Image (tube, rainbow, N blue to C red):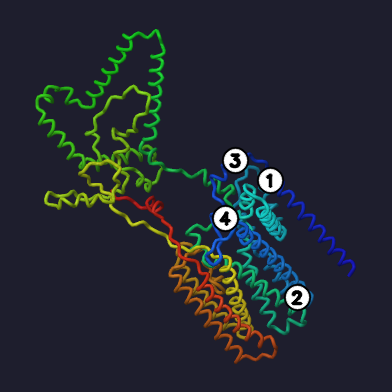
Amino acid sequence: MGGQKQWFESFIIILTRFSETVLHLTARLAMEPESEENNKKASIAEMSILDKKPLRVFGHPLTTSQQMWLGFFIPASISMIVFIVNFSLDIAVAFQLLRDGHTLLAGATIILVYAPSIVCFILTLTAMPQLEKVCDIIIWIIIQLFQCILFPVAIIYRFATRLFWSIVAITEDDPVREKALRIAGASHQSELFFFVDSFLNAAPQALLQAYILLSPQIVTSDETGWTLAVSIVMSVISLSKTAAIYQRFESQRAVGRTVPWECQSTEAHIKALVNLTKVDPLVLMGILKTNETMKRNAEEEHQQTEEQLNDPTMSPQTSNEQSLEGMDSTGADQEEGNPTEASNPASSQADPNQSTNNQEAEILAGDALSSNERSTCETQAKQNDPGQPNEQDALLPVKVLNSATQSRTPRPSLPYLEPIITQNVIVEDRCFWPRISTPPSTPTADPHMRPRLSINTLKTIKRPSFTTHIALPVRKPREKGLHEDEPLGIFTVFNAWATYLLGRILVIAAFTHFYLWPSVGLFLSHYAMMVAYLCFCNPCRNFWTPFLGLIYILCPLEVNVRYQYPRVFLVLFFALALLEDLSTVVLWYCGAEWESMWYDFAFFFIIGCHGMAAMNVSLYLFLFKPQTKYVDQSNRWDSQQPQPD
C-alpha cells in the first residue's frame, strides 16, 4: 500500500508541474506585444464574439460576465470532468474484467476506448499537408501517431487551454478579453474527437457493459457490478451531451452556426482561399481599365497645363497653336464618328426635317439592336476571360441605349476626372436589373400600362421611355433554419436525452440477453428504415449514410443531412422507439425466466426513464424551443440562376 500511495503522489506532482508549464508557455506565446493601432483596427473590423452569439435565459439578455461564465468556463469545466471520469471508469472496468478472468471483454473495452482516436488519426492522414521534404512528412506522421496513442494528454491540454483563456476573459478588459474569448472559442480538431467518441466509444461501451451487468455468470462481485453501473451512467451522459448539442445542427448551421471542428487556419483552407477567383463584372466589361486610362490621361493633361502656366518661355502664340491643333483633332474625331455628316454637310443644314426623322428612326431601332449588342458584349467578355464559368454572365449589365445615338464629345483639358464610359455609353445609363425580355407594347395597348410596369424599377437610373428590359419584381428566396438553444434549453434537452437513452440502452441489452435473434431482426429493420429515410433526405451523400443509420438506432441527429419534413419524422421516430421499447420490455418481463433483482430494477427503471424523458421534452417544447429563423439568400440565388438569352 505504501508503494502505491507514493507512486500516486509522484504522478499527481508530475501532472501538476506539467500543467503549470503548459499554461505558462501558452501565456507567453499568446501574449505577444501588440500596438494600440492594431488593437483598435481589430476591434473596429471584427465584431465581438458575445455580440455575434448572445446568450439569453427565458429570452432575456445576460451581462458580459454571465455570458462568459455560461458560455465558456462552465461548459469547458463540465466537459473536462465528464471526459476524465468516463475515461477513468472505462480503464477501471477493463482492469476489473481482466482481474475476474474475462480477457476478451477487457480487450473489447480497451479497443472501444481507442477506436475514436484511431478514426481521427485516419481522417487526419487523409488531409495530409503538402510538405516538400520526405523527412518532414515522416516527422509529421510520427507526431500524429504519438497524439493518437497519448490522446488523453492532448484532450486535457485542450481543456486546460480553454479554461485558462476563459479565466483571462473573465478577469481582464478589452482588448485582452476579446482576444482571450477568440482563443477559447476557436475551432479545434478535438471537437471532432468528442463527436466520434460519443458513438464509437460511449454508446458501444454502454451497450456492452449493460449486457455484462445483466449477466449473473459474468458479474460475480458487487464491486464489479457497481463499477459497471457507474460506467454506464457516465457513458450515457457523454452521449447525451453530444445529442443535446447536435440534435438540429444542420438547421442551425443554415442560419449561421459554424462547424466546431473546422480549423480556418489550416494549410488546406489557405490554399483553397488562394485558388479562389473572384469574378468582377466591371473587369469583364472593361470599365475599370477604361477608368484607369481616363484618370491617367486627365492627370497627364493637368500636369501639362500646369507646366504651360508656370513656363515663362511659353508664348501666347504657341498656346494658341496647340489649342487650334486640339480643335482640329476634335473635329476629325467628330467626322470619324459621323462620316455621313462629314461628307455632306450641306444636306444636314438644308433639310432639318429629314435629320429629325433619321434621329427618330435611330431611336426606334435601338431596342431592336439592343439584343444583338448584348450578345456581342457577352461574347467579348468571354473572349477576354475564357476561364470564367457561364453562371457569371448574370453579373453583366444590360445595355439599353444604342451606341449610335450617343454623340462623341471632345475631351476637355480640365483637371477633373471624366465620367466612366464603356462603348460610348455612360455607366449611369446602364441598367443592372434582371434580363427579363417582354414583348413590345402595341398601339392599341392601354396607355396607363407603361407607368405601372415601371413602378418597381430603379427611379434613379435614367433610361429610355420605350424599352423591352423592364425590372419586374422577383420574390426573394429565403432559407429556413433555427436559432441556437439557450443554456437552460440545452440543460433541459440534455436531461431528456439522458433519461431516454438510459432506458433505451437497458431495453436493447435486456432484450438481446433473452432473445438474441429476434432482437437482431428487430433492430436491423429499424436500421433499414432509418437508412431509407436518410437516402430520401439527401441521396447524393452516401458515404456517411451507413454510419448515420447506426446512430439513428439510438437517437436521431441532424448532422451531415438535412431533415425532410422534420416534425413528421421526429414524431414517427419517437413513436416507433417507444413502441419497440414498451413491447420488448413487456415481452421479456412476462415471458422470460429470470431470478436476479437486477431485472425487477431494470423493468421499473425503464418505465421511469421514459416518463422523465416525456416530461423534459414537454418542458423543452413549451418553454425553451428555439424560434424559426429565415435568412435571405437572394445574392447567392441570383448568382446561381441561369439568365434567359
| Residue at mark 4 | 50
Outermost residue on the right side: it is 2
CA–CA distance between discs 3 and 2? 58 Å
State the residue in front, 402 or 163: 163
User: Which secondary structure lies at badge 2?
Assistant: helix
Q: Residue at x 66, y 88 (%)?
A: 600
User: Which secondary structure lies at badge 1?
Assistant: loop
CA–CA distance between discs 1 and 2? 48 Å
| Residue at mark 2 | 97
What's the residue type where badge 1 is placed?
Answer: Met
Of the residues under marks 3 and 4, which one precedes in the sequence?
Answer: 3
User: Which secondary structure lies at badge 3?
Assistant: helix
Of the residues under marks 2 and 4, which one precedes in the sequence?
Answer: 4
CA–CA distance between discs 1 and 4? 21 Å
Of the residues under marks 1 and 2, which one precedes in the sequence?
Answer: 1
What's the residue type where badge 4 is placed?
Answer: Leu
What's the residue type where badge 3 is placed?
Answer: Asn
- Whether pointer 1 and pointer 2 mark residues with C-beta atoms closer than 8 Å, the reply is no
Numbered label attached to residue 249: none
Residue 498 placed where, x, y %? 61, 74
Q: Residue at x 69, y 83 (%)?
A: 215
Q: Is residue 20 left or right of residue 307?
A: right
What's the residue type where badge 2 is placed?
Answer: Leu
Camera-near label (2 vs 4) is 4
| In this view, 33 is above or below 170 | above
State the residue in front, 181 or 80: 181
| Residue at mark 3 | 38
